[in-house]
Image (cartoon, rainbow, N blue to C red):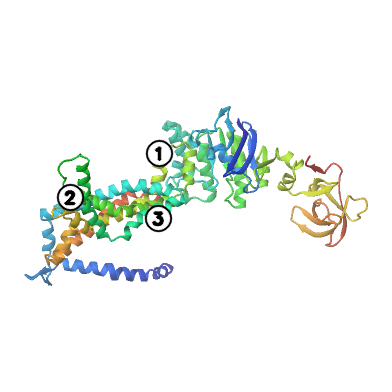
């Protein structure tokens, strides 16, 4: 009875969630099992041919590339963000305010403009190539733009704040007395970081990683602008199926597969990261 | 054992601990007692290495510790709020210091078992801190420190967060533990009763200065300053010819007939506290009240407003100050 009552408070959230997440998702699932006529209209038949098409090696390859790129982006973001968040969290109060402001200020500028700025930097006649030639380090301009590297760079650049902020919050909330206790018990700075700080900020790492992974694998703008035609990701395919090829059932099928794999990967990741102590805490 | 010589601490030009010299003997239970903000915790943190003295030296067994970081000092601190590692079991918490010292696994096991047995935690070793009560967490904090077999154990208000009954139990456990381990304890508290009960010697501190150092008996019977006279136990302060002297409530007696008594006053309140019976008397010629503890066999009825004589045996008064 009491549980049921406390569940009542969740109703508005559940309503919101079903209206904007569950219902659209169900529509996508339904469409993915339908057919299409020559004009690209969705035809109400039940068929699984869209799913069969997915197992074409072309799409599987793109799919695999997407996962790899998203994982690499997540790892790189983590490697850059942890030291940054650590530095900000341990700086003086003024520096903290400034550091956080500098992390968030890029959000004030339109994301497309920021991505096109990378085009100006990376293209053959761009700032980077010109500088390298000026210094005499290279003689011919390098092909920087429209490569996988450019896409990776754009992704890491775009999503670093998503990693820095949760880790910063976790570091901020950590009880600093634990570090004194570790110090008192003979731990060196590196050991107390490894045994205390890192496990204590796991929640921030988990939140940040999921945010970055999901955002990267769903991103098509960065790949479009910096990657050119060769480095399409699954989201680019989904986008073109819906808007260009007018093959809604196939686009929907890709979306469904995409959502399911993401959920499975996140679940596996959470499982691997959740320590016994958190499990014990939640089990109570 | 531990020697503080001329240790002084300033924060931003403000003197928090005035120059202090103190020798703590081996196996001693020494308590730093004082109100909050008197500098007692700062002294403890300087011994532990978390604060650097502005001047002076701290020696442990003759070697200078002053510039060593906390992780290289052969002493351990029991933190006020325990600071247990939340992501580790009781056992892993206790093992932490031993792992950092890279003791062989066999020795680690032995030390953990000893510490756990001594603090009665054997049944709880696989639990996490959040699954323990306050008193149990306190025990883990102590076990984690003593497993390292430090030369000195520093305790920062270790019982401060516990309720009264639990405090009383843990006080006697602590005393017992200190005796059986034989290691030096430096204990910080603001609770004078706790200090009296546990300590071999007490250092009374007030606004960064040492008021008095002595055994509980010396401090109670012969307080040297007005602060120590009133901070430890209840006391009555009288003045005579510009000098102050103190007489403990249990040394005062009250007479129906004021004649021949040293002071005269009016009964303000009669307090019955079970094992003791107290009178509060407003003195006539001094703007103060005194409290008098009556003999347990004293059955005389007292009424508020009654005129009484207050008396004490010559020699029971303690002159305060130089």
- Residue, far front: A134
Q: Position of residue B62 (x, y in %)?
A: 58, 27
Identify which residue, B15 or A183, lies in the foreground. B15
Q: Residues within 10 Å of mark 2 (few under 14, many from 20)?
A: few
Q: Of the numbered discs in the image, which one, if any, rests on residue A190?
A: 1
**Image quadrant of residue A132?**
top left
* The one of B51 and A197 positioned closer to us in this rendering: B51
User: Nearer the viewer's eye, disc 1 or disc 3?
Assistant: 1
**Farthest residue toward the right?**
B259
Mark 3, residue position:
A282
Which residue is at the far left? A38
Q: How far apart are the alpha carbons under marks 1 and 3?
A: 30 Å
Mark 2 — on which chain does it sit? A
**Residue A272, x across and y down, in percent:** 31, 49
Tags 1 and 3 both on a single chain: yes
Q: Chain of mark 1?
A: A
Q: Quadrant of the N terminus of chain B?
A: top right
Q: Earlier in the sequence, mark 1 or mark 2?
A: 2
Residue A258 in view here: yes
Disc 1/disc 2 C-alpha distance (Å): 45 Å
| Discs 1/2, front | 2
**Residue that label 2 marks:** A125
Q: CA distance from mark 3 to mark 2?
A: 56 Å
For marks 3 and 2, the one nearer the N-term is 2
Q: Give me the residue at 39% from left, 52% from top.
A: A99
Mark 2 lies on a secondary structure that is: loop
Q: As displayed, is residue B93 above or below residue B68?
A: below
């Amino acid at each position: 009875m009491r549980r049921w009552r406390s569940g009542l408070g969740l109703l508005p959230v559940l309503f919101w969630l079903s209206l904007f997440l569950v219902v659209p998702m169900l529509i996508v699932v339904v469409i993915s099992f339908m057919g299409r006529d020559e004009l690209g209209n969705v035809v109400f038949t039940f068929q699984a041919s869209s799913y069969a098409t997915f197992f074409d090696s072309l799409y599987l390859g793109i799919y695999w590339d997407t996962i790899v790129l998203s994982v690499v982006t997540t790892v790189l973001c983590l490697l850059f963000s942890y030291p940054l968040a650590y530095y900000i969290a341990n700086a003086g109060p003024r520096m903290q305010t400034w550091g956080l402001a500098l992390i968030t200020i890029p959000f004030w500028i339109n994301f497309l403009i920021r991505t096109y700025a990378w085009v100006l930097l990376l293209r053959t006649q761009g700032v980077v190539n010109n500088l390298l030639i000026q210094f005499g380090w290279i003689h011919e301009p390098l092909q920087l733009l429209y490569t996988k590297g450019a896409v990776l760079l754009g992704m890491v650049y775009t999503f670093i704040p998503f990693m820095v902020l949760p880790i910063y919050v976790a570091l901020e909330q950590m009880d600093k007395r634990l570090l004194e206790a570790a110090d008192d018990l003979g731990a060196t700075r590196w050991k107390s970081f490894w045994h205390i700080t890192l496990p204590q900020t796991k929640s921030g790492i988990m939140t940040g990683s999921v945010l970055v992974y999901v955002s990267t694998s769903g991103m098509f703008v960065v790949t479009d602008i910096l990657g050119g035609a060769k480095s399409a990701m699954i989201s680019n395919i989904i986008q073109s199926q819906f808007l260009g090829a007018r093959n809604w059932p196939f686009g929907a099928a890709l979306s469904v597969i995409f959502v399911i794999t993401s959920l499975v990967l996140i679940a596996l990741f959470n499982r691997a990261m959740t320590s016994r102590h958190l499990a014990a805490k939640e089990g109570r | 054992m531990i020697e503080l010589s001329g240790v002084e601490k300033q924060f931003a030009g403000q003197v928090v601990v005035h120059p202090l010299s103190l020798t703590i003997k081996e196996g001693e239970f020494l308590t730093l007692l004082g109100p909050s903000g008197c500098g007692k915790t700062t002294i403890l943190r300087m011994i532990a290495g978390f604060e650097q003295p502005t001047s002076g030296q701290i020696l442990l067994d003759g070697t200078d510790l002053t510039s060593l970081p906390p992780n290289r000092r052969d002493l351990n601190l029991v933190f006020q709020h325990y600071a247990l590692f939340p992501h580790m079991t009781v056992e892993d918490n206790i093992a932490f210091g031993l792992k950092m010292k890279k003791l062989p696994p066999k020795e680690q096991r032995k030390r953990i078992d000893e510490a756990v047995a001594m603090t009665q935690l054997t049944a709880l070793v696989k639990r996490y801190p959040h699954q323990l009560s306050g008193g149990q967490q306190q025990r883990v904090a102590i076990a984690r420190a003593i497993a390292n077999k430090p030369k000195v154990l520093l305790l920062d208000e270790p019982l401060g967060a516990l309720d009264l009954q639990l405090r009383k139990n843990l006080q006697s456990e602590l005393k017992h533990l200190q005796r059986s381990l034989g290691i030096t304890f430096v204990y910080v508290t603001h609770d004078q009763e706790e200090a009296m009960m546990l300590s071999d010697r007490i250092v009374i501190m007030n606004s960064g200065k040492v008021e008095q150092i002595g055994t509980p008996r010396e401090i109670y019977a012969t307080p040297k300053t007005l602060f120590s006279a009133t901070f430890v136990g209840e006391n009555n302060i009288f003045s005579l010819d510009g000098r102050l002297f103190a007489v403990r409530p249990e040394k005062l007696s009250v007479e129906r007939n004021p004649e021949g008594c040293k002071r005269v006053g009016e009964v303000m309140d009669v307090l019955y506290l079970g094992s003791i019976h107290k009178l509060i008397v407003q003195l006539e010629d001094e703007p103060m009240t005194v409290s008098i503890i009556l003999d347990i066999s004293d059955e005389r009825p007292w009424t508020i407003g009654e005129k009484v004589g207050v008396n004490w045996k010559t020699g029971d008064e303690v002159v305060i100050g130089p």
